Every structure is written in C-alpha cells, then in structure tokens.
Amino acid sequence: MTANIEGLEAVTVHVRDIEKARQFYGEVLGLEVLQFDGKVGRAVFSLPGTTVTLRMHVYDPEEGGREPGTVSGVVFSHRDPVAACAEITRRGGRVVDPPHQIHPPGFTATLSVIADPDGNEFVLRSPPTPSA
C-alpha cells in the first residue's frame, strides 16, 4: 500500500497574542525565529534537529480549527528534561507537569509537560532507553 502522507512540514498553533508567543517560543524555549510579522499576527520557528517548523498565528474564530489553549499531543525532545524544565522556569515559562520517569513496555523515558502563555501544552521527553 502506498502511503498518502510523505512527511511532516509544520505544526501550527493558534495563539491570542503573537508578541507573547514570540517571547515564549523564542526566548523561553530558545527556538530560532524564521519569520515574524506582528501586524498580521504570524510567526514561524525552526525546530532543532528537524526540517519541521512550528508556525503560529493569532486565532480568528471564523477560520475554524482549534482555539488557543487547546493544543496537546505535540512531543518535543531534550536529552535532559529536568535541566530543560529548570531553565524554562528560570526564563519565565510554565511547567505544568514536572519531569518524571515513565516505564511503558520496552523503554524508560523522562517526560514533563510545559505550556505556552495561552495554555497550549507540549510534552518534553527524553529519548527512550530500552528497558532491561
């Protein structure tokens, strides 16, 4: 069977305030800003180690889609989520669920949940290590 999806280009997040989003994603998370237009309320950030971009724009109820503060299920990676969460907090970010180990069948990982100013939540997870 031929795949109908051949890759992932971008993840889009709706926000209420593009300036707060630029500060959070750029300064708190440390993502590189690729494009920013405050007048039209749009921004694009690079995701390290990938060709995928994180895009955002100010939500317009007429366009449909998820309202700001309802995104979840996007997983970011970091080799040390404990250190990353400490730095995110130091920079003014919010950790919703502190780093903790998980042990699903076959691997162990450390994960936490962080939130942007609108309440969009992102998992921050270490690379999985095989369980013994």
Image: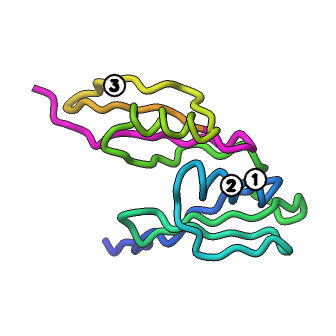
Q: CA distance from mark 1 to mark 3?
A: 32 Å
- Magenta stretch encompasses residue 118: yes
**What range of the chain is rendered magenta?**
115-132
Q: Which mark is residue 50?
A: none
The amino acid type, in three-letter code, at marker 2 is Gln
Pick out the residue farthest to the left: 132
Contact between labelled residues 2 and 1, with CB atoms less than 8 Å apart: yes
Which numbered mark, 1 or 3, is in the foreground of this view? 1
Residue at the spot x=83%, y=65% of the render? 63
Q: Is residue 35 left or right of residue 8?
A: right
Amino acid tagged 1: Lys
Of the 4 image quadrants, the one containing the C terminus is top left
Identify whether 122 is placed above or below 54.
above
Q: Dot 1 surroundings within 10 Å: few (below 14), some, or many (20 or more)?
A: some
Among the 4 quarters of the image, the one containing residue 51: bottom left
Crowd tier of the residue under label 3, counting other residues whose Cα lies within 10 Å: few below 14, some 14–19, many 20 or above: few
If you read the primary sequence from the N terminus, does the residue marked by circle 1 or circle 3 appear first? 1
- The residue where tag 2 is placed is 23
Q: Which residue is mark 3?
A: 102
Q: Quadrant of residue 14?
A: bottom right
* Residue for badge 1: 20
Residue 19 position in % (x across, y down): 77, 59
